[in-house]
Amino acid sequence: MSGTRWLLIETFGGGEPTVVGLGSAPRKFVPLTQMFRQRETLSVIRGAVAATLARLESVDVVSEDGRRRTVTVPLHITPERVHAVLLWSGPVEEELPPRDRVGAWYFNLSTSKSTRSDDLLELYGVAPENRAREHAIAGVFARVITNSDESDALAKIVRSAPGTEHQAVWTVRRDDGALRAAHFSCRILEEHTSAEGPEIFMRGVTHDIGDATEVSSAPPPVILEHRVLDAAAAEGEYRAIVDLRNLRLLRWMGPAMPGIAWQSLAGEPEPGIHPEDLGIAKAMSRDLAQSRTSGVLRLRALDGGWRVVRARAVLMALDQYTTAALVTVRDPDLVD
């Protein structure tokens, strides 16, 4: 192992830890046994990772012969849980190299909420006074520029099948305006976190791998599919992708409709459809199998009340087996 690079080792759960980054180079869930052929080195690496997970803190050890130093940095998502370990191992006389920014996160797919670590908010360039750790999953897409795998990623969220993994390079818009290439790795897990039964989580880490203008795998500022949708939208219309299983927002395509509660931020009303209009929304969802559908619905507003919108929906394929709804909303008094 080169003494000049850090390893990023995921420890989400669901199997043995694997390597997802070597320096700033992404790796595809590589088993430690493939990275380290020498039994002694493998034993040292495994021991350092295990000790980090057990102690929930960094490890800094020197080999018995005094030649090699191994250092770890845990990436916490909560004080009690580590999503990944940054690990460096090299000659004792060598200085530790700089570390890339890496942050942990998870989606609770049972509640459509996302939780971010302080490290991830640091990667995003969010000022300490503005750091909201929990928000709606849809809020993630307001910050990133997705790549051609977006439909595949959304399909995996919709299916929520434990054991599913995903990796990609997307572009992150930092709060200081910088565009950074970010490689993320994640896995879906079923976890028994409460007496109410199991919940489904997508757990992951995001790794800043460089300036987006210099990383060839980073997506362009606007991909063609988004340009087409933006061009087709009329003034006063807002488009969203909605999960047909639970009628929850997956993401806005373009700007969000003003005044609608959708981010699930602290101090804001929870997003939702008026209980009396759920029957209309479910009927629209069922009828999409045959044709386009439309209806008038009340959505929770930011002021705590309800906002009346006209919604039109069409069925969209996320992949060969998974569909969602592309929903266009507008004020009901706008002229078609």
Image (tube, helix red, strand yellow):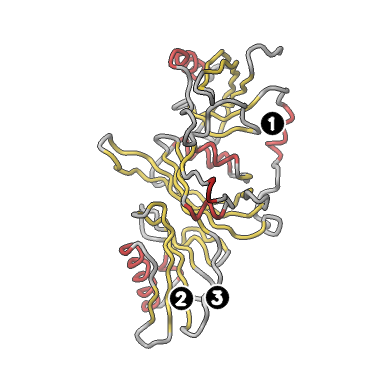
User: From the image, which quarter does the C terminus lie in?
Assistant: top right
As rendered, which of 101 and 224 lies closer to the eye? 101
Do labels 2 and 1 touch, CB within 8 Å? no
Q: Mark 3 belongs to which amino acid?
A: Thr
Q: Mark 2 belongs to which amino acid?
A: Ser
Viewer-nearest of labels 2 and 1? 2
Mark 3 lies on residue: 4
Give the answer, above or below, for where 242 lies relative to 23. Answer: above
Q: Residue 274 appears at what percent x and percent y? A: 47, 17
Left or right position of 164 against 311: left
Residue 18 lies in quadrant: bottom left
Q: Residues within 10 Å of mark 1 (few under 14, many from 20)?
A: few
Mark 1 lies on residue: 229
* Secondary element type, mark 3: loop
Q: Residues within 10 Å of mark 2 (few under 14, many from 20)?
A: many
Mark 2 lies on residue: 89
Give the answer, above or below, for where 241 lies relative to 336. Answer: below
Q: CA distance from mark 3 to mark 2?
A: 9 Å
Q: How many marks?
A: 3
Residue 104's disc is none
Q: Residue 199 appears at what percent x and percent y? A: 34, 39
Give the answer, above or below, for where 33 lies relative to 67. Answer: above
Disc nearer the start of the sequence (3/2): 3
